[in-house]
Image (spheres, helix red, strand yellow):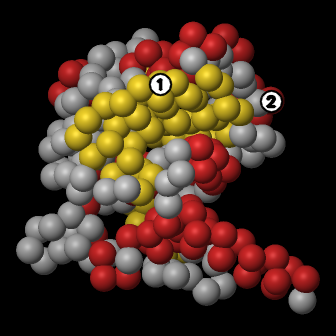
Amino acid sequence: MVARTELILGADEFAFELPPRVRWARRILIKPCAAHSLPYPVTTSRQTLEKVIHAIRAVSEADIILLEGNPAQEQMKPIYQSLGYDFPRVLTLDVKDCVFVEVENPLARPFAMSTFWLPNVLLYCDYLISICPFKVSAGHGDLTIKNLLSLLPVNKYQGADGSDWGVLRPFGMDKVIADLYFTLPFDMGIIDGRKKFVCSSEAAQGKSQKCGKMFIGEPYEVDLEASRSEGLVTEYLQWIEIARAQMDDNWEE
């Protein structure tokens, strides 16, 4: 994990510095926020992705994989193309085309889900990075940990009426996201906050505001710092804090 969270002000100052572990990785997976054919700040900026990929390539010949899924199970290839994700020697994968394995939640007392079905490619990668824009959805942070939700297979978790994540919603989505954080621990989170995208419940409709901040670090720390910087209540972080406290108590016992 990254030892600290870095807050960088100004887009021109953003320089992606690799932690030593990245240099030893054979496969690096990047999870962008790219479920829609809409440009930054709705989706992950091509410019930011390019900087991260360039930094990796400067020190490593590791396989680099982009993995994303669409909640309506539309093909990801044309979405990747429309967003300009055409980087050389980078493999772009669609979640719905993956083989899935059931992974156990390591929490002794899960909040919602004791297991998750996840793409097996995740288990073969040595370093996992979540990169997302700075989104505020209905007054709550929609950040690097929530970005992991679209790695889940829609056909296993959609409701009987076809609603996205209909199987999960009765448990409370913030609890589900907290469980996913522990079940699928990502090594790094990057929030591209050069702009902030504020929307209602409809994730693709909202307004862009100047923000001028980049957050880089361990996903929980990054999401927490970003939320604090803008005075946001990001509920899934509260559930993660509760789980961490329980884990500390169990360790002391």
Q: Which of these two is toward me, 252 or 156? A: 252
142 sits to left or right of 111: left
Q: Which mark is residue 194?
A: 1
Q: Would residue 242 be seen by someone viewing this image from the given angle? A: yes
Query: Is the residue under label 2 in contact with that under label 1 (CB below 8 Å)?
Result: no
42 sits to left or right of 55: left
> Could you tell me residue 35's position as x and y percent?
27, 41
Earlier along the polypeptide chain: callout 1 or callout 2? 2
Point 25% across, 61% down: residue:
154
Q: Which of these two is toward me, 48 or 198? A: 198
**Structural crowding at the residue carrying mark 1, measured as other residues with C-alpha within 10 Å and reported as few (<14), some (14–19) or many (≥20):** many
Is 145 rendered above or below residue 61?
below
Among the 4 quarters of the image, the one containing residue 25: top right
> Could you tell me residue 14's position as x and y percent?
61, 17
9 sits to left or right of 206: right
Amino acid residing under circle 1: Arg
Amino acid residing under circle 2: Pro
Among the 4 quarters of the image, the one containing residue 43: top left
Q: Residue furthest front?
A: 231
> Could you tell me residue 196's position as x and y percent?
40, 34
Q: Residue furthest left?
A: 161
Is 50 rendered above or below residue 197?
above
**Structural crowding at the residue carrying mark 2, measured as other residues with C-alpha within 10 Å and reported as few (<14), some (14–19) or many (≥20):** few
Which residue, given by chain and number where applicable, does mark 2 sit on? 20
Mark 1 or mark 2, which is nearer to you? 1
Report the quarter where the N terminus lies.
top right
Point 20% across, 52% down: residue:
202
Considering the numbered disc 2 on the image, is that residue within a helix, a strand or a loop? Answer: helix
